[in-house]
Image: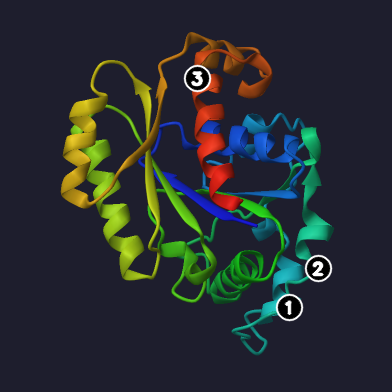
Amino acid sequence: MIKIAISGKGGVGKTTLSGTLARLFARKGYDVLAIDADPSMNLASALGIKNPPAPLTEYKELIDERAGGPAGVFKLNPRVDDIVDKFGVIGPDKVKLLVMGTVERGGSGCMCPASSFLKALMRYVILKLNSVVILDMEAGVEHLGRGTTKGIDYMIIVVEPGARSIETAGRIAELGRQIGISKFGVVINKATGEVLEIENKLKVYDLSVIGSIPFDPDMVKADLDNISPIERGGAAISSITNIFEILSNKME
């Protein structure tokens, strides 16, 4: 089994890649869990799930019970082994989706139990769950925590043409290496004629490209029609399928 984390600067298309890869792995017969760990929480649409599960952070009573509420004893390792089955939703191609939600900050009170709960769940999923796991992450890898990264097999960083996107990829790789992630691959999205130039710029960060996805009006059409990209098809999906084959071969 393989655990893939997908990251990148906001708006580069990592959610489309995450959802499509999850569907493709499922179609090949794998048990797939897709985790939406991005605060924008759009992975359900990319998977074709019309009624996504509520974010786990909305279950405050559960979190208080498992991790310790404001007046209780704070638990560093709350029980989470039943969460995927209880709160995951099964979508097309039998992909199971779990939405993490966001931890509130500022004057909302102590959210230590919620943070502990989410970190424990990520550790369980990455280190113990015997499935293909696709993590649609926020820009950066801090929320994985130092105790969860040993089980990640591959970090895909999505970039698009532009200096800021490439610089973000470099920062993500640097931080990822600091917390133990060793295998990276870059996917260039909305690619036109700049692939070779981007590949050369990424060499500064010791990053290599595993595939590129062309700009595809079909992706815009899929969004407007509120259907998953894989159902729409097109040049972008064909390119993601090629990336899937590369990743699939790494599992064999």
Q: Earlier in the sequence, mark 3 or mark 2?
A: 2
Q: Amino acid at mark 3?
A: Ala
The residue pinned by badge 1 equals 79
Dot 3 falls on a residue whose secondary structure is helix
Left or right of 85? Residue 202 is left
Label 3 and label 2: CA atoms lie apart by 36 Å
Q: With respect to residue 58, does 75 lie above or below?
A: below
Left or right of 34? Residue 139 is left
| Marks 2 and 1 close (CB-CB < 8 Å) | yes
Nearer the observer, 220 or 114: 220
The residue pinned by badge 3 equals 236
Quadrant of the rendered image containing residue 177: bottom left
Q: Amino acid at mark 1?
A: Arg
Q: Amino acid at mark 2?
A: Asp
Label 3 and label 1: CA atoms lie apart by 40 Å
Percent position of residue 71, x then y: 65, 85
Q: Residue at x 52, y 29 (%)?
A: 242
Residue 42 visible in the displayed image: no
Q: With respect to residue 154, does 70 lie above or below?
A: below
Percent position of residue 183, x then y: 40, 57
Percent position of residue 133, x then y: 63, 53
Dot 2 falls on a residue whose secondary structure is loop
Label 2 and label 1: CA atoms lie apart by 8 Å
Percent position of residue 184, x then y: 38, 52
The residue pinned by badge 2 equals 82
Dot 1 falls on a residue whose secondary structure is loop
